[in-house]
Image (cartoon, rainbow, N blue to C red):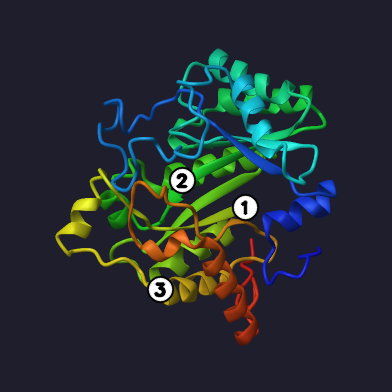
Amino acid sequence: MEWHGRPYYSLDAFLKNTYGEKLYKIAVDAGFTCPNRDGTLGSGGCIFCSAGGSGEFAIKTADHPSVTDQIETGLSLFAHKRVGQRFIVYFQAYTNTYGPLPHLRALYTEALRHPDVAGISIATRPDCITENIVTMLVNLRQIFTDKFVWVELGLQTIHEKTADFIRRGYPLSVYDSCVSLLSQADIPVITHIIIGLPGEGEEALLSTIDHLNQLGTWGVKLQLLHVLRDTAFAGYYHDGSYTPLARDAYIDLVIACLEHLSPDIVIHRLTGDGPKALLLAPLWSLDKRSVLNTLHHTMKLRAACQGRLYERHSS
C-alpha cells in the first residue's frame, strides 16, 4: 500500500494506486430533502446544518435541473486545469437516498452513464438505507462493471448524549446495522466524524475512532465543527456557551485520530470547507492550505503517522 509521501492513507493515494490518477469530484444537488427537515423526524435539521443541507458547493438544481447538466457544468469548471479524464459525481446536498426507489435509480444511472464519470459517492443517513436500496446499488454496479458506488454516512459521534444534542435523529445501532448491510453487499462506506462537538474531548473522540476500527469502515471524513450563520448552533456561539477549537487544538485532535485509526482506512477529509458567506467561526479554517501544511509539518516533527497507536481487535 503506497501512501505517496503522506503520513496517512489519503484518498489521493488510494485513487492513484487504483486508477493511476487523481479523480476530482463534481458535487451535484439532486433536489432531495431530509427526514430531519420535512417533519418526519424533525423540522430544523441537525443543529449545525445549514439551510442548504451541506450542499453549498454543489451546482444548484435551480440553474441546472438535470444531473447531466450539472455534470457538464462541473466539467467546464475543470476545463482550464490540468486534471485527469475521469471524475466522481458526489450526491452531496441533504439525504441522497431519501426518495422513491425508481427515482433514486434513475438519478444514479444518469450519473453512471456519463462517459467521464468513474463512479458515484452518495451522501446519506443510515436510517435512509434499506435492503431494497442496497440491492439496487448492487445491481447498478453489476451493470456498470467498470464504475464504483460509494455510500457516505453522517455518524458524527458514537455518543448518544451528543447525538441527542445535535439532533442527529437516530441511535448508534442504526448506523451499525447500516454498515453491516452495506459491507455484506461489498459497498464501500465512508463515515463522517465531527471534531469539536460540545462536551467531547480527546477521550470521547477516540472512542468513536475505536468504534470505526472495530465495526469496519472503508473511509473516513474528519470534519471540523463549523459555526454557520442562521443555524440553531449559531445561538450557542453568540451567547458564549460554545467556544470553537483553536487551530493547534484541532490539529492535535486530528493527529490523535489518525494515529489510532487502522492504517487500512482511507482518509477522505481532514478539515472540511465552511462556506465563506456563512462561516462565523472558526475563521482560521478558511485558510485550508495553511491548516493542512501545519498538520503535515507537525506530524513530521512528532514522527506521527496513521495507525501508529492502532490496536487491532480480534474478531
Front position in the image: 127 or 222: 222
Residue 231 higher or lower than 34, as above or below = below
- Where residue 171 appears, as percent x and y from the top left, is 37, 45
Using residue 251 as the reference point, say whether residue 39 is left or right of it: left
Quick one: quadrant of the C terminus?
bottom right
Label 2 element class: strand
254 and 170: which is toward the camera: 254
Q: Residue at x 39, y 26 (%)?
A: 33
Between disc 2 and disc 1, whose residue precedes? 2
Q: Amino acid at mark 2?
A: Gly
Q: Viewer-proximal residue, 160 or 277?
A: 277
Name the residue at the left extreme: 239
- In the rendered view, does 33 fall on the left or right side of 58? left
Residue carrying label 1: 219
Badge 3: few (under 14), some or many (20 or more) residues near its Cα, within 10 Å?
Answer: few
Give the residue type that dot 1 points to. Answer: Gly
Q: Is residue 47 left or right of residue 93?
A: left
Q: Position of residue 119 (x, y in %)?
A: 71, 34
Residue at the location (44% across, 71% down)?
Answer: 250
Q: Is residue 302 above or below residue 307?
A: below
Identify the residue position indicated by label 3 in the image: 203
Residue 154: assigned label? 2
Disc 2 to disc 3, C-alpha distance: 20 Å
Q: Earlier in the sequence, mark 2 or mark 3?
A: 2
